[in-house]
Amino acid sequence: MEFTRRTFLAGAVSAASAGAVPPRASKMKFGLTTYQWGMDWDIPTIIANCTKAKALGVELRESSKYAHGVELETPEAKRREVKKRFADSPVKLIGLATGERFDATDPAALKAAIENAKGYAKLSQEVGGSGIRVFPNDFHKETPQEKTIEQIAKALNEVGKAAAGFGQQVRLENHGSAGRLVTLAKVFEQVTQPNVRVKLNGDVRDAEGGSFAKNFALVKDRLGYTLHCRDLKDPAFPYQLQTDLLIDAGWDGWWLVEQSNKVADRIAALIQLREAWEGLVANSLKR
């Protein structure tokens, strides 16, 4: 091939591009956990309202007899119906937010929590979800903290192994006195199941003294596919910093709104939160 000025310039541009730092991009998505704002919405209403608000991912809160009607006792036909409704809609069913916790000092209660969590993993698969939320949850005066950490990790390994058989992630929420990120890092030193992950929860304790980036670094390699968020303009928690760190890490999961405050129009409020979230992302991408 004849070497021309055009081919020289093309090669120079290609070389420059190869060495260029790619622009920052966000793979994150926005949705809702039905905790309080969706407690009285059935499945068609959840889909309609979340579509209107452009909150296109949903996590169903469990163990609370909510209007969506998806629980451990839900029959197979209803499970198939729920899966189809979401599959035929713009809204993705992300998973189930269980109330199961692995800190119990009573062996029978711990065993029940583990078995229930396994059942929820099966339920999540059958309704089209990708994982379940569980809690650590608390330290107890009568039990050494190291023993509670070991117990939580052992329970997670058992649940994680079962959930893997259903293709499900187990999302350990940053919740309770045993749920600070520094503690979860210790738990995960003993967790061997790769599908067991950390679910961030906007816990202000993890940001005390400007320490959020340090605490985030402890768990960033074990983050799950979802996190919970609340008032994105609340100065008590560094949501902009969290956004920056997640984008830096290439995290591609879902921010799920978990709100309990009373508002006149939940759809309008959800839209406002989505717009605030979009602002956080836009600010981060300008860096």
Image (tube, helix red, strand yellow):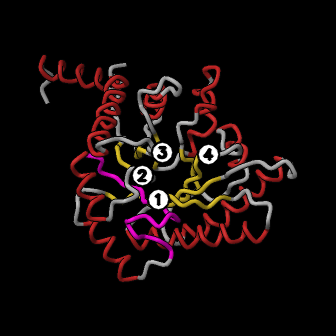
Choose mark 3 or mark 1, whichever is in front.
1
- Residue 35 pos. (x, y %): 45, 53
N-term mark: 3 or 1: 1
Residue tagged 1 = 61
Whole-number angstrom distance, CA of label 4 to CA of label 2: 15 Å
Quadrant including the C terminus: top left
Residue 32 image label: none
Residue 175 image label: 4
Residue tagged 2 = 33
Question: In the picture provided, is 141 more to the left or to the right than 246?
Answer: right
- Residue 108 pos. (x, y %): 76, 72
Whole-number angstrom distance, CA of label 3 to CA of label 1: 14 Å
Whole-number angstrom distance, CA of label 2 to CA of label 1: 7 Å
- The residue under the point 52% across, 69% down is 120
N-term mark: 4 or 1: 1
* Disc 2 and disc 1 in contact, CB within 8 angstroms: yes
- The residue under the point 48% across, 30% down is 242
- Residue 32 pos. (x, y %): 38, 49
* Disc 3 and disc 1 in contact, CB within 8 angstroms: no
Q: Which residues are magenta?
A: 54-72
- Residue 125 pos. (x, y %): 44, 70
Whole-number angstrom distance, CA of label 4 to CA of label 3: 12 Å
55 in magenta: yes
N-term mark: 2 or 3: 2
- The residue under the point 27% across, 58% down is 47
- The residue under the point 58% across, 57% down is 134
Q: In which quarter of the view is residue 114 placed?
A: bottom right
Element on which disc 4 rests: loop
N-term mark: 4 or 2: 2
67 in magenta: yes
Residue tagged 3 = 227
